[in-house]
Image: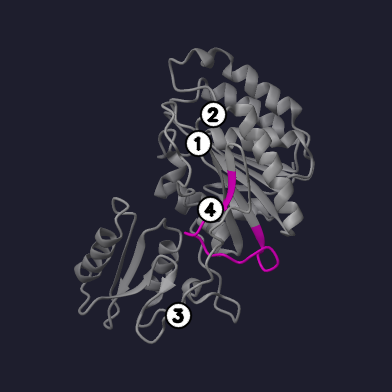
């Protein structure tokens, strides 16, 4: 399932209005909606004869990304291909439109953490936003610094629907598992006080593990989205011996009857000690939450980083948004609802 941008109306930001790009037929507008789920840098180009092309995150190089988008437009028969949208701005001559900038300073911070609005996403502010998605990055076994890393593309579905996106950046020097969970709880309480109508806590790997840990405190989040949750290192790590026991404790301590929980596991994940056992443990969350969506090893998506795969974005981003908001959702071939 592909999440299309909202239908055009007075409140739709020009960037997200799929009816706004000129010269495009229906297929081009559908592809523009797919472009809106891409990470930055990203560029959408089109021509007056109706051809188009886009590119995203080419070696994290804005110039190379733009060149590829123009090349793709020309490859599909475009003459005089011109950039329509770049990152969060419409730059087509005569239709230029920019969006409000996210705050540059953290909303809050402490020793080892910061609550940072992400400038690569559309910003609305607490009183105008539909909700907020708090994203927590993973933790590298080698101690690499993941602060500032871009949230996975499925988060764009929430942002395009009106959610602000805020990162929970953590210093690798002090980023222990229990500390990360404590920082996330503190951040979620603060976002509630900011006045957001809905609060979603999500993350990948260690960030996802921390998101599951906050389920022991009711009311912190309306939804939790845990992508490849892990906290015990890759295969061969001594900690794998107690990884399943720790997960059982987290699930047993969960008590969030109004929180919907989505978990994604992937085939070939080197941080997953036992896929079958983990799926069984996660299934117990159905009785400890407002509903569980378990995306257990979706076909064709491989490895610990599967949440960043385009197949996951196009197949499950819309479904995650629908599920998080309590609507009936079709995820792959499975229809789910928010009820246990």
Cα separation between marks 2 and 3: 42 Å
Quadrant of residue 93 in the image?
bottom left
The residue that mark 4 highlights is 155
1 and 4 marks in contact (CB < 8 Å): no
Q: Along the horizontal axis of the image, is 207 left or right of 192? A: left
Is residue 14 in view?
yes
The residue that mark 3 highlights is 20
The location of residue 320, given as percent across then percent down, is 59, 50
Total marks in image? 4
Mark 4 element type: helix
Sequence-first tag of 4 and 2:
4
Cα separation between marks 3 and 1: 37 Å
Q: Which residues are magenta?
A: 114-131
Cα separation between marks 2 and 1: 9 Å
The location of residue 273, given as percent across then percent down, is 51, 20
Q: Nearer the viewer, residue 282 or 16?
A: 16
Outermost residue to the bottom:
94
Magenta highlight on residue 9: no
The location of residue 292, given as percent across then percent down, is 67, 40
Q: Residue at x 47, y 52 (%)?
A: 153
Quadrant of residue 20 in the image?
bottom left
The location of residue 142, given as percent across then percent down, is 41, 26
2 and 1 marks in contact (CB < 8 Å): yes
The residue that mark 2 highlights is 230
3 and 4 marks in contact (CB < 8 Å): no
Sequence-first tag of 2 and 3:
3
Placement of the C terminus among the 4 image quadrants: top right
Q: Nearer the viewer, residue 315 or 212?
A: 212
Cα separation between marks 4 and 2: 19 Å
Q: Along the horizontal axis of the image, is 265 left or right of 197? A: left
Mark 2 element type: loop
């Amino acid at each position: 399932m592909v999440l299309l941008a909202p239908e055009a109306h007075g409140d739709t930001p020009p960037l997200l209005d799929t009816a706004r790009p000129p010269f495009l037929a229906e297929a081009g507008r559908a592809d523009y909606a797919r472009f809106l789920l891409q990470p930055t840098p990203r560029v959408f180009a089109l021509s007056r004869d109706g051809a188009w092309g886009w590119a995203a995150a080419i070696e994290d190089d804005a110039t190379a990304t733009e060149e590829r988008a123009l090349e793709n437009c020309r490859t599909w028969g475009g003459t005089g291909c011109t950039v329509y949208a770049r990152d969060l701005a419409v730059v087509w001559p005569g239709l230029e439109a920019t969006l409000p900038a996210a705050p540059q300073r953290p909303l809050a911070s402490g020793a080892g953490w910061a609550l940072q609005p992400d400038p690569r996403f559309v910003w609305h502010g607490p009183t105008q936003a539909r909700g907020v998605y708090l994203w927590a990055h993973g933790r590298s076994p080698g101690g690499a610094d993941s602060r500032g890393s871009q949230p996975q593309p499925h988060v764009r579905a929430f942002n395009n629907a009106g959610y602000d996106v805020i990162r929970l950046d953590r210093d690798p020097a002090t980023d222990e598992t229990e500390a990360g969970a404590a920082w996330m709880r503190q951040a979620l309480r603060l976002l509630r006080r900011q006045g957001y109508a809905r609060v979603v806590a999500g993350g990948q790997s260690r960030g996802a593990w921390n998101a599951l840990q906050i389920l022991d405190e009711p009311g912190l989040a309306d939804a939790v989205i845990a992508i490849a949750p892990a906290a015990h290192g890759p295969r061969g790590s001594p900690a794998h011996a107690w990884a399943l026991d720790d997960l059982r404790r987290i699930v047993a301590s969960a008590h969030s009857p109004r929180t919907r929980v989505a978990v994604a596991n992937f085939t070939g994940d080197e941080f997953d000690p036992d896929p079958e056992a983990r799926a069984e443990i996660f299934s117990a969350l159905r009785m400890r939450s407002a509903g569980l969506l378990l995306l257990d090893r979706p076909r064709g998506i491989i490895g610990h980083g599967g949440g960043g795969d385009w197949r996951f974005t196009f197949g499950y981003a819309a479904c995650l948004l629908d599920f998080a908001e309590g609507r009936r959702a079709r995820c792959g071939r499975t229809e789910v609802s928010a009820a246990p």
